[in-house]
Image (spheres, helix red, strand yellow):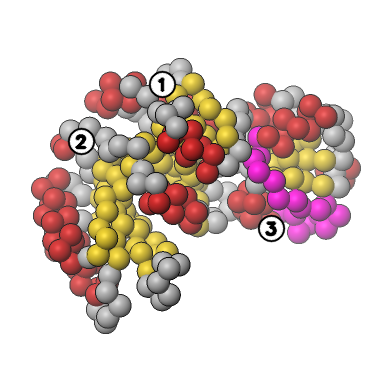
Amino acid sequence: MSLDENRDFFFMIKSVAIQGIQGSFHHIVSQQFFETDIIVNECLSFDLAVERLLEKKSNAVIMALENSIAGSIIPNYALIDQHNLHIIGEHFLDIQHHLMALPNQSINDIREVYSHPMALLQCKTFFKSYPHIKLIEDKDTAEVAQRIQKNQLYNVAAIGSHLAAELFGLEILSRSIQTITHNETRFVIVKTSNSEMPEQQINKASLKFELEHKRGSLASLLNVLSDCKLNLTKIQSLPKIETPWKYAFFVDVTFEDYNDYKKAKSIMQLMAEDFKILGEYKNARL
């Protein structure tokens, strides 16, 4: 991502918390998004990464939000909402999963593969051809690769990035094992306060709202977006645990004119309950 006009703003971020360690896809995003040296605080869960942000031990968190194969990462939507965090940017990363192990082994030598549940889900078709391999969920793809090297674990493999294989001296047994060749994940950069990006640079927003449980309430609100020339690029519902059969909606919208968005926002605030702006930022697709 080219930061162009936003470069000064993002240079204010000196450290980011990530889920995972060096060699993880979150680490790769930190390198690509900021295009500068930045301190990376490694965390083995998104909850811990958010804690680092709230404790002011990091200036921001990089958080995967959805994948083109596996879909939305629902708990991360909830984390952003519950802690009143703000999305200040986004980054799309092409995810290529490689099967890796200590050198001088073949795939037939592998008995166990440890990896993050999302990675296993994205690669499940590949492993149908190797029924002798046991798939085991773990906290982080790169951390498994590091563990294999540190403990010299033979007959054990990891799923991870090319960078992880390089960093931990592992041999790639099979490349790009994900079910669908084009496998992309959308990451967001999150802070405790909203960005100070100039309005003329903002062309995407993430919003959250609730609606009365009555016929046509969602359709009416979506019509407002259309009438105000907003493009709905994402809609995700989450049940409200404390109120059975009531849902919160998370939506992403893009627009060409900030004034169109401003108009839609003012109408939605009147129509919806618990309306919240989760972030206003620059569309990474442009």
Q: Find residue 158 and report its image quarter.
A: top right
Q: Position of residue 55 (x, y in %)?
A: 45, 32
Q: Quadrant of the C terminus?
A: top left
Question: Does the CB distance between marks 2 and 1 fall below 8 Å?
Answer: no
Q: Is residue 33 visible?
A: no
Say which label, 2 or 1, has the lower sequence index: 1
Q: Residue at x 21, y 49 (%)?
A: 255
Query: Foreground mark, 3 or 2?
Result: 2
The residue at which mark 3 appears reads as 125
Say which label, 1 or 3, has the lower sequence index: 1
Q: Residue at x 18, y 61 (%)?
A: 268
Q: Is 262 colored magenta in this rendering?
A: no
The residue at which mark 2 appears reads as 201
- Mark pair 1, 3: CA separation: 40 Å
Query: Foreground mark, 2 or 1?
Result: 1
- Mark pair 3, 2: CA separation: 42 Å
Q: Is residue 57 visible?
A: yes
Image vertical order of residue 47 relative to residue 264, above or below? above
Q: Name which residue type carries label 2.
A: Gln
Q: Nearer the viewer, residue 255 or 195?
A: 195
- Mark pair 2, 1: CA separation: 22 Å
Q: Residue at x 87, y 36 (%)?
A: 154
Q: Position of residue 198 (x, y in %)?
A: 18, 33
Q: Residue at x 10, y 48 (%)?
A: 259
Q: Is 129 colored magenta in this rendering?
A: yes
Q: Position of residue 81 (x, y in %)?
A: 38, 51
Query: Foreground mark, 1 or 3?
Result: 1
The residue at which mark 1 appears reads as 14
Question: Where does the magenta region start and end?
Answer: 126-142
Q: Find residue 236 and report its image quarter.
A: bottom left
Q: Quadrant of the N terminus?
A: top left
Left or right relative to 257: residue 242: right
